[in-house]
Amino acid sequence: MKIEVLEPVNGRVVLLAKEKGNPIEGIEIRVEGESKGRTGAGGELEVQSILAGTHNWEALDSEGREAKGMIEIPEITQVEYVPMSVERDGQTVTKWHPLTDTLSFVIEITNTGTTVVDHFTWRQTADIGHMKIDLLHPKMPAKVWRPFAGNLLSGVTTVETRIDGDRVMMIDTISGISKEVISRTPFTPGGLQPGEKLVVEQTGRYWDSLQEAMDSRGIELGTEIKLNVVDEGKGIVDMVIKEYKFGPIKLHDMKARVIFKGPFKVCHEVFVDGELFGSDELGWELL
């Protein structure tokens, strides 16, 4: 008997048991003394967790015959992303009040490759530019300022998530602000081993996340954007932009009134070193 490494399937290592050139079913395969399971039809076994590198293997059949050897596992970077969920008081929700509710945003990543994963990039695109917006200052035609205001609200948030020792940190790539978040699952300090899962929970007021998003947009545009609550119950907020240029015109203290209410779409994407590994598109609603 001998064991071969086949081309990866969806980023997972596949081992093949053969004897005299023919595949063998029902062979138990052990790697570094740890059983990885038995081969199925066609003599193949998809391995869920194994590190890249050179490994000792053992193969045992139902009659007790045993074979040993060495295999080389290739380096594969691969993660599996479960669409984000939002929780309020422990219950999954898709609707919430933007100024009063405290929410938990939950991201789940599994390392399905053969390398240690200690970071990934999470990008969110939220389309809330259709919310009701009225310009309070200065007075100008809606066709001039409305596209800018809508684009401002429908920005992209990019966050780098890193495993730093036994902590999980999320860093806004625009503002550089980092915060420690909760992991609902145990993980190996320093990075996710092959087969290991990380479930990250970021909990806080949704209102705070809106202001943080505007802080990042302000830095991106070279200005300062503040949100001031006008009517908490109705979700009415004044958005104040310290300075902005419309062509040759420079405006100061531009103020728009926004009502955060209604349905909107949001898209999330997960990357490792620039390569996209998963995405979702969700429908949420502000009450």
Image: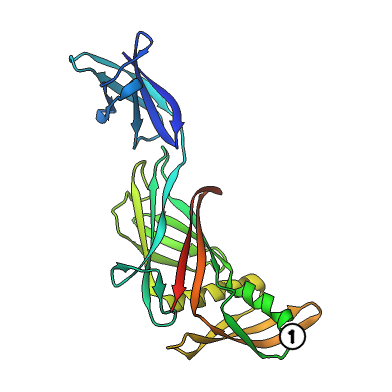
User: Which residue is at 27% across, 15% downward?
Assistant: 67
Q: Is residue 62 left or right of residue 264?
A: left
Tell me where residue 54 appears, x and y as whole percent: 39, 26
Q: Is residue 70 above or below residue 175?
A: above
Q: Quadrant of the C terminus?
A: bottom left
- The residue carrying mark 1 is 141
- Residue 215: give x, y in percent of width and height: 55, 75
Name the amino acid, label 1: Pro
Residue furthest to the top: 20
Q: Residue furthest right?
A: 248
Task: Provide residue 85's location: percent of width, then percent of height.
Answer: 38, 62
Residue displayed at 66% across by 74% down: 222
Under tag 1, what secondary structure? loop
How many numbered marks does the figure carry? 1
Residue 26 image-quadrant placement: top left
Rendering coords of residue 164 (x, y %) = 40, 56
198 and 27: which is toward the camera: 27
Residue 191 seen in the current view: no
Front residue of 109 and 279: 279
Local packing at callout 1 (Cα closer than 10 Å; few below 14, some 14-19, many 20+) is: few
Q: Nearer the viewer, residue 205 or 32?
A: 205
* Extreme-left residue of the structure: 63
Q: Dividing the image into 4 quarters, which one contains the N terminus?
A: top left
